[in-house]
Image (tube, helix red, strand yellow):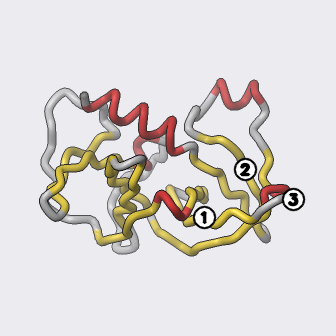
Amino acid sequence: MLKNIQMVVFAVGKEYYGIDIFCAQEIIRIPKNITKVPNMPSFIEGMLNLRDQVIPVVDLRKRFGVENTETENDSRLLVLNLEGMLLGNIVDDVSEVLSVGEESIESLYVEIAHLGNNCIKGICKVEDRLIMLLDVTKLKNEIFASVS
């Protein structure tokens, strides 16, 4: 029996992405006190003290190669809890929580997945949008390898 998956849907540039709702800890306005860390990849904005826990902050617009990386009023920090490790992600907008059936999620063609973003594990069509599902384990491994 196939089950439904609940996901938080957010925008990065003009594209929509989804992550399992159980990974989302909170959504907040982007704090002003992100501390830059030297010699980090350009998509790592820095570190943030979030209620006495220091977490890395990633600009997903830069990570996914979006041209305009200016922070807008709708931009948010999507804080993920990845197996006890917190990770802040700057996104353009958090739009909704969706429930989709497993059968509506398609895997990426192997050739495409190796060419581009290795953090995408699948894609689903919801109304007139395509939502790319992030592989949060791969994202976590990439980010924490960069900051350690």
Q: CA distance from mark 3 to mark 2?
A: 20 Å
| Residue 117 vertical placement versus 125 (above, below) | above
Task: Report the amino acid beneath label 1.
Answer: Met
The residue labelled by disc 3 is: 1
Which quarter of the picture shows residue 130?
A: bottom right
Task: Report the amino acid beneath label 3.
Answer: Met
Foreground pick, 127 / 8:
8
Residue 123 shows which numbered tag?
Answer: 2
Mark 3 or 2, nearer chain start? 3
Tag 2 secondary structure: strand
Task: Report the amino acid beneath label 2.
Answer: Ile
Q: At 51% from the left edge and 62% from the top edge, which residue is drawn?
A: 22
* Drawn side of residue 89 relative to residue 65, left or right: left
Which quarter of the picture shows residue 49?
A: bottom left
The residue mark sitting in front, 1 or 2, is 1
| Residue 90 vertical placement versus 39 (above, below) | below
Q: Are marks 3 and 2 in contact (CB under 8 Å)?
A: no
Tag 1 secondary structure: strand
Q: Quadrant of the C terminus?
A: top left
